[in-house]
């Protein structure tokens, strides 16, 4: 049985919470590989508020090099238009043909899944792992997903990741205010943010 996980996110910037979540899922579901796929234009976001993809990609690549199971895929970046998860899942299935596929992302993003493109097809095609952070009210997720049929509901797994006390929003805010970000993300990513003057304006 082969299992692959996709780590989907904006990664603006990637931090230790993301890396811990990916490693935990890899271990729990015995995945041979975790593909980090930075979203090029997240479907629901105003692209002017997000750092250019070249920076988000570079930081993601730097962050995963120390884990042999982790790779970065430019699949969504290479595709033109919005990053719909259904298209990503189809492309990964076609390329790797895994027996099991897991799409990991934040619980807040999964909360909105009902409004995503082709949700039923998506939940038939792969499992979703909703990573929750400290303080997250899981009943939000359960309540919002109530409308889904049982066979689809079973495809959504939530996983509590204490390291997700770290958030990209907080890191951007810290840089903007001149507060430290050391130990919240890999050192090469910290240096990259400084060198490229990211997040000075928020
Ligand atoms: P987001 O709104 O930036 O993030 C929502 C929450 O989830 C934030 O708290 C975020 O924390 C957390 N999060 C995001 N990615 C995570 C990850 N991989 N692991 C753990 N926590 C994570 O969400 P987004 O990044 O734009 O979207 C997440 C994924 O869902 C992307 O792959 C996107 O393409 C997909 N998506 C698809 C559709 C669609 O197909 N219609 C619609 C929306 C989203 P941090 O800020 O700390 O990361």
Image: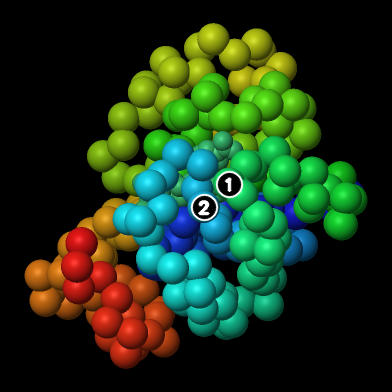
Is residue 170 shown left or right of residue 152? left
The residue indicated by pointer 2 is 41
Task: Classify mark 1: helix, strand or loop.
Answer: loop
Residue name at image x 67 percent, y 71 percent: 71
Asked if marks 1 and 2 touch (Cβ < 8 Å), the reply is yes
- Neighbor class of circle 1 (other Cα within 10 Å; few <14, some 14-19, many 20+) is some
- Neighbor class of circle 2 (other Cα within 10 Å; few <14, some 14-19, many 20+) is many
Q: How many marks?
A: 2
Task: Classify mark 2: helix, strand or loop.
Answer: loop
Asked if residue 77 is positioned above or below residue 119 in the image, the reply reads below
| Residue 128 horizontal/vertical position (percent) | 62, 37
Is residue 17 shown left or right of residue 155? left
| Residue 62 horizontal/vertical position (percent) | 52, 81
Res. 167 visible in picture: no
Asked if residue 141 is positioned above or below residue 195 in the image, the reply reads above
The dot on residue 82 is 1
Does label 1 point to a residue whose CB lies under 8 Å from ligand 1? yes
């Amino acid at each position: 049985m082969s299992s692959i996980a996709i780590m989907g996110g904006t990664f603006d910037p990637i931090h230790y919470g993301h890396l811990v979540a990916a490693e935990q899922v890899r271990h729990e579901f015995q995945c041979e590989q975790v593909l980090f796929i930075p979203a090029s234009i997240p479907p629901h976001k105003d692209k002017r508020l997000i750092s250019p993809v070249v920076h988000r990609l570079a930081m993601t690549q730097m962050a995963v090099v120390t884990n042999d199971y982790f790779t970065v895929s430019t699949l969504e970046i290479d595709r033109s238009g919005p990053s719909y998860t259904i298209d990503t899942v189809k492309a990964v299935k076609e390329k790797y043909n895994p027996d099991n596929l897991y799409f990991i992302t934040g619980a807040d993003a999964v909360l909105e899944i009902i409004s995503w493109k082709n949700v039923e097809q998506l939940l038939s095609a792969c499992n979703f792992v909703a990573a929750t952070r400290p303080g997250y009210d899981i009943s939000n997720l359960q309540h919002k997903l109530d409308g889904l049929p049982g066979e689809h509901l079973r495809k959504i797994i939530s996983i509590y990741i204490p390291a997700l006390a770290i958030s990209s929003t907080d890191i951007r805010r810290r840089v903007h205010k001149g507060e430290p970000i050391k130990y919240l993300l890999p050192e090469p990513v910290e240096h990259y943010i400084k060198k490229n003057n990211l997040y000075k304006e928020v």
